């Protein structure tokens, strides 16, 4: 019996070792497959994570036009607009039927050659067959080119489209519907889930557009610049990367501050948090809006300068459009799929502003200085907008970011008791204009008294000598 039990124990041990070896082989195979996927995966266009959606679900939801595979079966209006996209593509193919058919075939062959690379740009498997996927790339790519071209030629100072105006302003834009598309539809094009890869658009642009004197990068830049005309930028068309991923990536470049690489020169110290505008004001910090007439260097919306007790910022025009753009760019910037690390300057700005504007009173401080202008219901709504931007963000305030130097200097200034005392005296005795006048009157009276005393003494001395 003992031998039998021993044999059974050895047999069981060998079976366990075999099972463990099999598990190890499976784990090794899974690891190799994951590494291969990481090498191939681009994950440039993905669904927005739930932690970002909690703040504002509508900021990521398309309403008029679906671009890419994620929202193809959206609202009824989006379904009707699919026909508009096809018509725009046909217009770009040309009026000659034979030439158009030949060009369409050439475009589809190009899409077929890019299909696998384009599929890898999306998060997860795209449940579309090859023909449907290639047709989507062509139709959506041609539509995007038409929209970029039409919006790019609008004057920067143009008011939103006049609904009574009927003149043409670009491919397929000659009536009220297309004017509305330019104003309302372009917002759909800067949503993260509503993108197609730019290398696909490049291919279509080369086939459909007479690109003498222009490029896709320049066309797209002009469109984004006109769309975000109230948001100053420190970048220009030359800063657009050759490997720009999509339109949200281009918006990320547009928002890049001039000082985005200044963290290395920030020096030592720690930043637990940025303080509110009211707290900084209580230590004598003043806020000033940078004038457009001021000379170089370039100064974008995200640039913040602190010198001589004055924080200089660009004028902030806050509305729902800006909020939507920032939320989608933040979601893109925060993702690190396939090991991709992106410069987190928009994240740093979002956290800075959310802590700077801790209450409606802080918004009022920036509004009085001319830095902030908003079209929301009240200052509390503007505060909630910025507080919501920072919700769900992964960010180390004490880390290596472009606002580190400004944060350190601001906190050092706030930490000096003399600054806080001088600011208290100024608020207590000089905020009221009547008190200022009273202080001036008292100073003048004191000066007059001193002068009168001096003259009295001077006149007394000679008379005293004569008497002696």
Image (spheres, grey):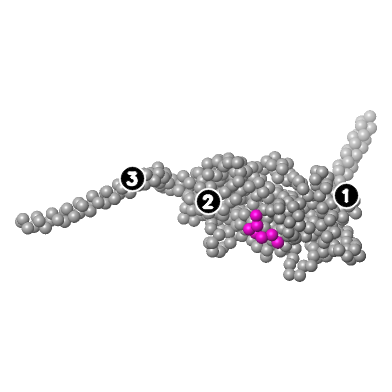
Real-space Cα separation, disc 1 to disc 3, in angstroms: 79 Å
Viewer-proximal residue among 337 and 22:
337
Q: The residue tagged with tag 2: helix, strand or loop?
A: loop
Q: The residue tagged with tag 1: helix, strand or loop?
A: loop
261 in magenta: no
User: Which residue shows up at 53% across the image and 51% down it?
Assistant: 370
User: Which residue shows up at 80% across the image and 43% down it?
Assistant: 75
Can the viewer see residue 41 in this picture?
no
Foreground label between 1 and 3 = 3
Where does label 3 land, which residue?
Answer: 438
Where does label 2 land, which residue?
Answer: 370
Q: Residues within 10 Å of mark 3 (few under 14, many from 20)?
A: some
Q: Is 304 positioned to the left or the right of 462 in the image?
A: right
Label located before the other in sequence (2 or 3): 2
Where does label 1 land, which residue?
Answer: 128
Residue 277: x %, y % from top left: 52, 46
Real-space Cα separation, disc 2 to disc 1, in angstroms: 51 Å
Q: Is 162 positioned to the left or the right of 72 in the image?
A: left
Quarter of the image where one finds residue 303:
bottom right
């Amino acid at each position: 019996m003992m031998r039998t039990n021993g044999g059974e124990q050895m047999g069981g041990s060998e079976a366990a070792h075999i099972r463990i070896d099999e598990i190890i082989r499976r784990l090794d195979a899974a690891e190799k497959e994951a590494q291969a996927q990481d090498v191939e995966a681009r994950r440039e266009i993905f669904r927005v994570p739930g932690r970002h959606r909690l703040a504002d679900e509508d900021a990521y939801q398309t309403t008029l036009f679906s671009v890419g595979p994620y929202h193809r079966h959206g609202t009824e209006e989006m379904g009707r607009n699919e026909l508009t996209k096809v018509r725009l593509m046909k217009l770009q193919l040309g009026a000659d039927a034979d030439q158009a058919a030949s060009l369409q075939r050439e475009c589809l062959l190009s899409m077929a050659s890019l299909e696998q690379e384009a599929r890898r740009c999306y998060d997860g498997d795209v449940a579309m067959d090859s023909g449907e996927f290639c047709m989507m790339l062509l139709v959506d790519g041609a539509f995007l080119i038409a929209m970029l071209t039409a919006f790019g030629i609008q004057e920067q100072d143009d008011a939103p489209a006049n609904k009574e105006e009927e003149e043409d302003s670009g491919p397929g834009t000659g009536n009220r519907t297309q004017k509305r598309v330019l104003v309302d539809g372009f917002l759909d094009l800067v949503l993260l889930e509503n993108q197609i890869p730019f290398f696909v658009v490049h291919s279509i642009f080369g086939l459909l557009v007479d690109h003498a004197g222009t490029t896709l990068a320049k066309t797209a830049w002009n469109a984004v610049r006109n769309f975000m005309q109230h948001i100053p930028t420190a970048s220009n068309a030359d800063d657009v990367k050759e490997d720009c991923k999509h339109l949200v990536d281009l918006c990320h470049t547009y928002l890049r501050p001039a000082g985005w690489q200044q963290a290395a020169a920030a020096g030592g110290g720690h930043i637990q948090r940025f303080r509110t505008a009211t707290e900084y004001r209580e230590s004598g910090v003043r806020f000033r809006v940078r004038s457009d007439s001021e000379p170089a260097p370039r100064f974008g919306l995200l640039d913040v300068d602190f010198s001589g007790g004055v924080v200089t910022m660009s004028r902030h025009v806050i509305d729902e459009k800006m909020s939507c753009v920032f939320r989608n760019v933040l979601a893109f910037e925060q993702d690190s799929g396939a090991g991709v690390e992106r410069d987190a300057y928009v994240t740093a700005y979002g956290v800075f502003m959310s802590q700077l504007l801790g209450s409606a009173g802080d918004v009022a401080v920036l509004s009085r200085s001319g830095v902030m202008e908003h079209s929301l219901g009240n200052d509390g709504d503007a505060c909630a907008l910025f507080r919501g931007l920072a919700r769900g963000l992964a960010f180390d305030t004490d880390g290596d970011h472009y606002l580190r130097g400004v944060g350190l200097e601001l906190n050092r200034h706030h930490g000096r008791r003399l600054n806080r005392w001088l600011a208290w005296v100024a608020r207590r005795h000089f905020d009221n204009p009547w008190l200022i006048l009273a202080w001036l009157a008292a100073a003048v009276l004191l000066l007059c008294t001193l002068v009168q005393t001096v003259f009295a003494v001077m006149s007394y001395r000679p008379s005293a000598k004569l008497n002696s």
